[in-house]
Amino acid sequence: MIWFRSLLFVAAFYLWSTIAAFLMVPTLVMPRAACAWALRAWGRVVTLLLRLICGVRVEVRGRQHLPTGPALIASKHQCMFDIFGAFAFLPDSCFISRKEFMRIPFVGWYIWKSRMIVIDREGQAKALKKMVADSRDRLKHDRQIVIFPEGHRGEPGEAGDYKPGVAALYRELDMPCTLLALNTGVHWPAHGFLRKPGTIVFEFLEPIPAGLKRAEFMRTLQDRLETASNALLAEGL
């Protein structure tokens, strides 16, 4: 039964995450690479548990577009697995995170140690300026900056309200923007505990080249992300 397997997975997920949170404490006084390695290991175990318990496999497509060095990635956002899964296959991901997460024990510590980019949504222009400065710093270390342009999790098939932060990064960093389409919300809903069997697909799309005007960039970004993500949803119908 899906509900029983889902309940079992939720229990296993929180048990493993609690164990991992304590095991990772020593990385707080080690080089950042140790914390990054631990987060990737945690994400890989979560992915394994999802497959073994719930029958949900993970497929990564468009690997020819998967960045291996410094990059800007704009991703759809349907559930928290968008982060867990990316830890497992991106070389050195750096997520744009809300400052509210910093208040959560362990979670906030590892966000700080792994040098994610923390923003204050109420900071407006000041927050954008800091986000750009922090992104430039992380790119010097060959990291992949991951931003969710919609700003929050949305239902599968729903086009969210694309925020201006991604356009600011695209303009100021003056680099291509890789797109990441996905269908995670079908198998790991944003709300509720049911995990539906099937295949979660992360699909890297051809990067948008640098230099487009803001309006053209935002239109291209949304059109391509929504079209590709909806195509992934249609595969499961």
Image (cartoon, grey):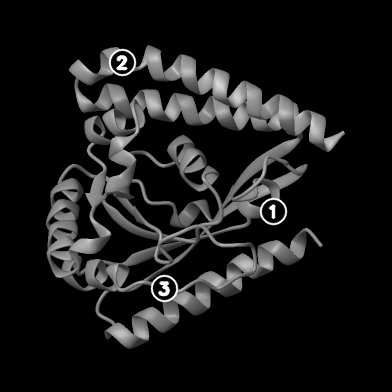
Closest to the observer, 205 or 26: 26
Question: Does residue 177 sit above or below 14 in this rendering?
Answer: below
The quadrant of the picture occupied by the C terminus is bottom right
Residue 97 in the image, given as x and y percentages of width and height:
32, 49
Q: Which residue is mark 1?
A: 186
Q: Which residue is mark 2?
A: 25
Closest to the observer, 207 or 171: 171
Q: Determine the residue positioned at 41% across, 42% down.
A: 90
Disc 2 residue type?
Val
Disc 1 residue type?
Val
Q: Determine the residue positioned at 66% across, 32% down.
A: 50
Element type at mark 2: helix
Q: Which residue is mark 3?
A: 162
Q: Earlier in the sequence, mark 1 or mark 3?
A: 3
Residue 27 in the image, given as x and y percentages of width and height:
27, 18
Residue 37 in the image, given as x and y percentages of width and height:
36, 25
**Contact (Cβ within 8 Å) of mark 1 with mark 3:** no
